[in-house]
Image (tube, rainbow, N blue to C red):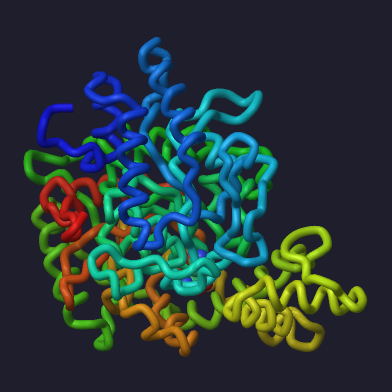
Amino acid sequence: MSAGTELHALGVADAARALRERRCSAVELTQHLLARAAAHAGLGAFLAVNEAAALAQARAADARLARGDAGPLAGVPVAHKDIFVTDFATSGLPSTAGSRMLAGYRSPFDATVVARLGDGEPGRGAGAGMVTLGKLNCDEFAMGSANENSAFGPARNPWDASRVPGGSSGGSAAAVAARLVPAATGTDTGGSIRQPAGFSGVTGIKPTYGVCSRYGMIAFASSLDQAGVLARSAEDCALVLSAMSGFDERDATSAQRPPQDFHAQMLQPREGAGAGRPLAGLRLGLPREFFPAALAADVHGALRAALAELEKLGATLVDVSLPRTELAIPVYYLIAPAEASSNLSRFDGVRYGHRAADPADLLDLYKRSRSEGFGAEVQRRIMIGTYVLSHGYYDAYYLQAQKLRRMIADDFQGCFRDCDVIAGPVAPSVAWKIGEQADDPVKAYLADIFTLPASLAGLPGMSVPAGFGAHGMPVGLQLIGNYFDEATLLQTAHALQQATDFHARVPAGF
Ligand code: GLN
C-alpha cells in the first residue's frame, strides 16, 4: 500500500480494488484488522474472533487473486452479527444470539448469508470469498434497541463510549463505525439495522422481506426478520447485499426472483438526470406523522438540512401521511413477542440450549433451564407472546394486531401513489447513555416508532448518515422504498453521499 493509507481506512469497494491490483494482500489486511479488533476490544463489538480460521481464508483468497479466478469481494473482511450461525468445524466460531442459552453453541452448518459471502454453499456454487473476521455482539435474540440486552455485556458507541451504539445489531454498527471491519451483517425485525446504523453514523440497509435467506439466522419473529448490511457507504452496502441475497429453497419465505446486482442498479443514471441533478424526477414523500412536535430539535435540524441537499440534487419533496404510525408500536409489540414465544420454545434444555444442573424432575429441568438461560427482556417477551396467543385473548390481541398490520401496509401503498421514496428520521433522538433506559423497557419500545411501520409492511429501508446532533452524536436519515425497489433507495443514498461527507467522518480515536 502507498504510504499514508492505513488499511482500516479502506471500505468494501476500496479494499476490493486494492486487493485486485495487488496493492495489499488479504493476509495483510486481515492481520491488520485482527490486531485492531484486539486493540479496541473495550468497545465490546466482537463476541468471538478466530485468527487462525480468518488467516486461512485470507490465504485462500490471496491464492485465488493470484490465479485471477477470484470473485469481486475476495479477500475483503466481513464480520457477522452473532445471530447468523457459522459452521464451527470450519470457522471455529460459536453462535450465541447474544444469549446465555446458547453460550458456546457449535453450529454444524453456515447460515446461507454467511456461506454466500464466504466460501459458498456446498454443491451450490462459489461464494464471494470474503474473509470472516468474527462474530459481533447483539441484543439477546435480537430483542432490544441498545445492545444492552446482550448476555455478554454491552457494545459501546465509538462516537462516545458512554453511549449505546443502538441495537439490536449494536456490535455490527460499532465495528463498522470504529473501522474495525469494512462491512458487517445485521438483522432487522423492527429496526435493528437502521437504528444502530443511525446511532453510530454508518450506512445500513434492510432489504424487502424475502430478499435475503433466513436459513441459519436464529429466529426472533419469522414474519419480520430480515438480513441486511451495515457499511460505510451506500456503494459498499450494495456490493455486499448483492453477494448475500437471492432465492434460497431452504427458506420458504425467500422471494423467487433472479439474482440482483444492486451496485450496477444503483449506478444506473435516472431518466432525466442531468449534471449535478442525479435525483431529477425523484419524489420524496415526507409523512407528517414522522415529523411530530416531539421530534428532538437537533434531529429535526439535521434532517431538514439533508432534505434540502436532496432537493438540490433534483428531488421534489411531497407531503404524505401514514396515519397509523403510532399504532405500529402496539401492533409490533404483540406480533413480535407472539412469534418469539413460539420460536424460542425449542430452547428447553433438552433439544437445544443451556441445561440446568441436577434437575429434580422434568418440570424443574424446563423451568430452571429457561430461567437461567434467558435474560429478563427475552423472558418478558415470551410471557407477553404466550399471553396474547392464549385461548380467549387470541382474537382480542393477536388477530386485531394482524388486521392493523395489513392496514399499516396499505397506508404505505397509498403513499407510494404520490412518491417514490419515503424519508424521515430513524429515531426520535440521538443515542442515549448506557443504562439510561435500562429499567424502563417501554421507553425503548416507544423509540422504535419510526422503524416499526416499514418492518410490519415488509418494505426495504435504509439509514444514511445525515449530520450530527446533540453531544456531537450522529443523526440518521431513514429512507423507505416500495417492495423490491432497493435500487432507488441506494441511488438516493449514493447521490447524497456524493454531495456530503457525513458517512466518511471517523469518530475521534479511530
Ligand atoms: N427494537 C426492536 C425490538 O426490540 C427491534 C429489534 C430488531 O429489529 N431485531 O424488538
**Is residue 294 toward the left or the right of residue 230 in the image?**
left
Q: Quadrant of residue 78?
A: top left
- Where residue 394 appears, as percent x and y from the top left, is 74, 82
In the rendered image, which quarter contains the C terminus? bottom left
Q: Residue furthest right?
A: 361
In the image shown, does 76 or 59 lie closer to the viewer? 59
- Number of marks: 0
For the residue pair 3 and 315, the one nearer the viewer reads as 3
Residue 192 visible in the snapshot: yes
Question: Is any atom of residue 454 visible in this view?
Answer: no
Question: Which quadrant holds the N terminus?
Answer: top left
- What's the residue at 68%, 77% (across, down)? 382
* 351 with respect to 62 (left or right): right
Instruction: Name the residue rendered at 38%, 69% in the picture.
Output: 166
Location of residue 355 in the rendering, given as x and y in whole percent from the top left corner: 77, 66
Image check: 361 left or right of 98?
right
Q: Is residue 505 above or below residue 133?
A: below
Residue 116's x, y, as percent?
Answer: 52, 34
Please report the residue visible at 79 percent of the width from the left and 88 percent of the height from the top: 392
Q: Considering only vertical position in the picture, is 19 above or below 501? A: above
The one of 241 and 34 positioned closer to us in this rendering: 34
What is the x, y in percent for residue 186? 46, 54
Above or below residue 137? Residue 431 is below
Q: Residue at x 53, y 42 (%)?
A: 113
* Residue 268 vs residue 44, the one in the foreground: 44
